[in-house]
Amino acid sequence: MKTKVALYVRVSTEDQAENGYSIDAQLNTLRNHCESLGKTIVEEYIDKGISGKSINGRNGLKRLLEDAKKGKFNEVIVWKISRLARNTIDLLKIVEELHKNNVIFRSYSENFETETPMGKFALQMMGAVAELERNTIVDNVKLGMTQRAKEGKWNGGSMLGYASKDKELIIIEDEANLVRYIFDLYISGKGYKAIANKLNHEGYKTKRNKAFSINSVRTIITNPCYAGFIRFNQVENWNEKRRKGTNKTPVIVKGEHKSIISEDIWEKANSILNQKSHKPAKTFTGTFPLTTLLRCPICGQGMIGHKAKKNKNGNEYIRYYQCGNFHYKGSSVCKSHLVTADIAEEYVFKKIEELTSKPSVLKGIVERVNKEIKTHKQPIQNNLNYVTKSIRDNEKSIRKLMTIIETQDNFPQLILKRIEELEIKQNELIEKKKYLEFELNKPTVKEISFEQVSNILSAFSKILPTLPTEQQKDFLHSIINKITVYKGNSPSKRNIKDIELFFDVSSSPNYVLTYGKVPRY
């Protein structure tokens, strides 16, 4: 019995493809290797232009792991282990996942058996070497960029007011005038939100042609490049740490580029910023578990927490949810559209509890969702049927032309060109077929059972009232997709319209259950 093999190949950059290990080069090497050993290739998984730093965004690898669970093959071969992962932890997790499904992992370039103790040890060592290699490259690149920054050189990127040409900043005068205007507004006493609101009302746009927000204004006001400085390494390891990776000692030196504002303006802006940063924190600590789940009835943006004093002289607050676009970008983008928080939260909690106590209602929802899933599934299936037929027809055309070549001594040279075109088309069709089959096998297009949904909701409704508010928020976000709100002229008239739930019933992508319209309070 021949070994059923899956091939996995990846390149992250065009440079890699040009230097010896392109997708085609890897595939040809692995195909020849399997042929020499009498192994049958049942599938080829490809990630093109994707980094091996993590598993995220690697659809080929995800599809491979899904198919491993289904038993489509019993061995995976890669050209080098660095093609599978550059992070040792990710590498070991992937190999362990394969082993759980009785799939052996092999590397063509590093010849060892991962199912033996010594093989596992060798894998760990090779994985560590691959990660060290990657980290060394990253450090070398970062060292070079740091040195450029210390010399006052720009390391690339995009920002309002400048164009970056060959890593040099060139002033765009129209944009530069807008930057000066923003600094003038800030120095005159306006805050980030007020500036964003004013700019949006006056029709200005960001570098990416978007409406201004609090964050986009803050980014400009706090950027020393506008005063002629180069700032580098402000945030370290952004992908892993996000804002927690803020570097307290970034490189800030005088740059080679021309400044847009004077150092005097920059100092004044910084002085105002420092004064504001030392204001005492507000004492209100109310939490908002439905943040971003509630959707603005006008623009559809997620709503966020807002509080207002019950009366001018008191310290008692009322909690509301307000449109996120209004909060961050001002009244030119949308209005506040306040929703009373206590009423909205009580309503959502009761509805979740009701669903578990009314099986007939829940069954109706499940039936409606399954009907929607079938509707969503049918076009994919139709497309797959069409592509499958096209592959068969294309194969017939290729065979017909090959017969002409084999039976005629002086065949037209155009036939070779036509065969090449058909083979390119065939490869494209095969890739499309794989994608459609993958889409059809997603849990989101499979019907769900009443029992699955009922068990999930029952567990949530029992535990929800006993949790701290922050954990309630996490739980609600894990079962609710969005909550839409009726339009109204006041918070009391903006009631909840419907709740859209989702459930991860298979440790895969989510099922969406629409709870439909519910009556007013």
Image: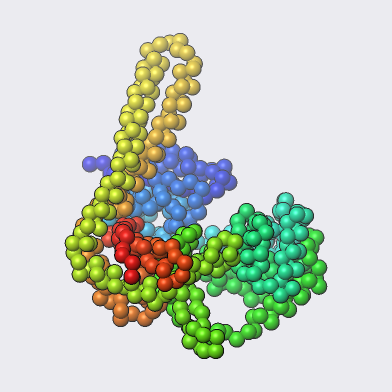
Q: Count of labels shown? A: 0
Does residue 517 appear in this view? yes
407 in relation to 246, above or below:
above
Q: How is the image coloured?
A: rainbow
Q: Nearer the viewer, residue 263 or 340?
A: 340
Asked whether, in this view, residue 488 is left or right of residue 147, the answer is left
Question: Which residue is most to the bottom?
Answer: 314
Asked whether, in this view, residue 20 is left or right of residue 218, the answer is left
* Residue 266 locus on image (x, y percent): 76, 71
Q: Can you say which quadrant of the picture contains the N terminus?
A: top left
Question: Which residue is most to the front?
Answer: 489
Q: Can you say which quadrant of the picture contains the C terminus?
A: bottom left
Asked whether, in this view, residue 211 is left or right of residue 365, the answer is right
Residue name at image x 40 percent, y 11 percent: 408
Q: Nearer the viewer, residue 60 or 504?
A: 504
Q: Nearer the viewer, residue 32 or 510?
A: 510
113 in relation to 382, above or below:
below
Residue name at image x 38 percent, y 23 percent: 398
Rendered image quadrant of residue 456: bottom left
Residue name at image x 39 percent, y 34 percent: 429
* Residue 488 locus on image (x, y percent): 44, 65
Q: Nearer the viewer, residue 432 or 521?
A: 521
* Residue 2 locus on image (x, y percent): 26, 41
Residue name at image x 44 percent, y 57 percent: 56
* Residue 98 locus on image (x, y percent): 32, 56
Does residue 36 appear in this view? no
Asked whether, in this view, residue 43 is left or right of residue 410, the answer is left
Rendered image quadrant of residue 221: bottom right
Rendered image quadrant of residue 391: top left
